[in-house]
Image (tube, rainbow, N blue to C red):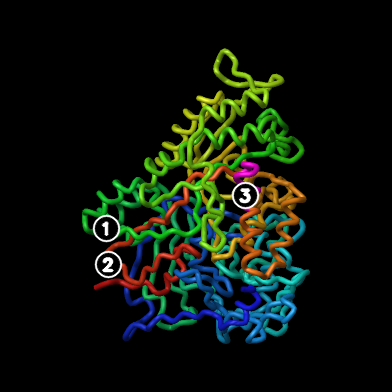
Amino acid sequence: MKLRTALLGAAATVAFAPMALAERGADGHVNVIYWQAPSILNPYLSGGTKDVESSSLVIEPLARHDQTGAMVPWLVEDIPTVANGGVSEDLKSITWKIKPGILWSDGTPFTSADVVFTYDYCTHPEGGCAQSAKFEGVSKVEAVDPMTVKISFADAKPNPYLPFVGAQSPILQMAQFKDCMGTKAPECTTANFGPIGTGPFKVTEFKTNDVISLVANPNYRDPAKPRFATMTLKGGGDAEGAGRAVLETGEFDYAWNLQLAPSVIDQMAAAGKGQAVSAFGTLVERIEVNLTDASPSLPEGERSTTKHPHPFLTDPAVRKALSMAIDRELLVEVGYGRAGRPTCDLVPGPEVYAAKNTSCFAQDIAGANKLLDEAGWVKGGDGIRAKNGVKLSMVYATSTNAVRQDFQALIKQWWSEIGVAAELKNASASVFFGGDPGSPDTFQKFYADVEMYANNFDGTDPEAYLSAYTCNKIPRPESQWQGENINRVCSPEYEAMIVELGRTADIAKRRELAVKMNNFLTVDNNYIIPLVDRGRVSAHSNTLGGVILNTWDSELWNAADWYRVK
């Protein structure tokens, strides 16, 4: 089946049944807790899920994905297809029709000019953008008229639904951000901390890495929504405290990302105040390998840049051995139970794109030692391997979380058994995922040799996700350390695959390419060492209705539909 054929089909739509006599703000206040505290409300300046999701309450994309992964119109009349004339016959452009009457929260009209501006903002040559992969292959974005925006591609684009689709690619208001282009982007704290949006809520106060206070958007397009007049999104603490606040004490209504052992969640739920909800999507806990030298002995501005290749992680044998030494089955048992599955893949789903590699499942300490012996890495009297005066000793960083610290301890032990020393480091999740260009502890800056975290992509097509690994998306000082290519991979072979995927329509061939790209990054080269395919686990109180867990978009995607169960 051709993807172009799929485009000819009717676009998916979704409808929510209106509640009888619904009235905006009638249900008072709702409390949400994200133990990874939001640091900024502009996802173009942060790749952290906590920032993408919290900002989704305020700023929105043209279309998004529902809980089934189906694409649904959001700020537009319908999903463009070849059949309805929205996608050109040559697949080189897509035209979106904005719904009439949509207003920004300040009461001004939302128009195509805002969409064009957002593209210019993210692709500004002097700036850095955390979501630039969303615009891979785009040649131009233009306002046909105030309610119509046309996106053109350099080549035929069988999957034109990357720009402005999903929570990672929302629209910014031109009037608010027009003076925040390029190098000025991170300096616009008023706009970045309090964006004017089209979403159900607007920000009244944002204390970075702490709490967001929101009120119902008086200009929201549905006069009956949101049902809650105010919302508090509290950040900080830990996953256990967040879970207890919903499931045991009832202090909060919704808790995100309960990264806890299943037995702990079950004990909390027994209190009867709420329920845990879970679903698998594309979230993978992984170890990222730094291909550049993060040594603090290097001058500031040169650490973790391509000016200095890593002294030993550029050796394929070392990266392979690090992966071979890990017992993924035990990690799942210790950290996630039924909410996790071992994986060797960056893209574990959806089914049509899953590579389904299993070669890494069996731990092989003996094989890893043999591989390092053959590569000339010799154990010294201290048990640490070395070659040409370079020791296999590294910094292993992650965010602060009980499960991740358990993983670090186990993996450090396994690596010691193959002659690799690891210094463990963890930073507050609010800082680690925050994207502050001045912080030495962000995952983008990567001032460590390896780091561990989870990430996923929105929607059900991995094209933008896999397109992140281009040379021009490497975080660097010139981009304010923004960029999705965390590992600093720079491969013409891989970039050629990105181009080919972008213009391939046949589903079978797209799968073949996606699997090949997945394998290039993981089992073939071990630039990324996947550990666990994680199910998303969150919780809501028994008095919060309308919650629909969505692993293909922001978890807060339908917050406008939440209501208080009487």
- Which residue is rendered at x = 69% and y = 28% of the image? 297
The residue labelled by disc 1 is 250
Task: Say whether residue 492 is left or right of residue 187.
Answer: right
The residue labelled by disc 2 is 543
Kindly state the secondary structure of the residue where label 1 is placed: loop
Q: Position of residue 446 (x, y in %)?
A: 62, 41
Q: Position of residue 403 (x, y in %)?
A: 41, 41
The residue labelled by disc 3 is 519
Looking at the image, is 107 positioned above or below residue 457?
Answer: below
Task: Say whether residue 324 is left or right of residue 468.
Answer: left
Looking at the image, is 147 positioned above or below residue 136?
Answer: below
First in sequence, mark 3 or 1: give its number.
1
The CA distance from mark 3 to mark 2 is: 45 Å
Magenta span: chief secondary structure: loop
Can you tell which of label 3 and label 1 is closer to the viewer?
A: 3
For the C terminus, the quadrant is: bottom left
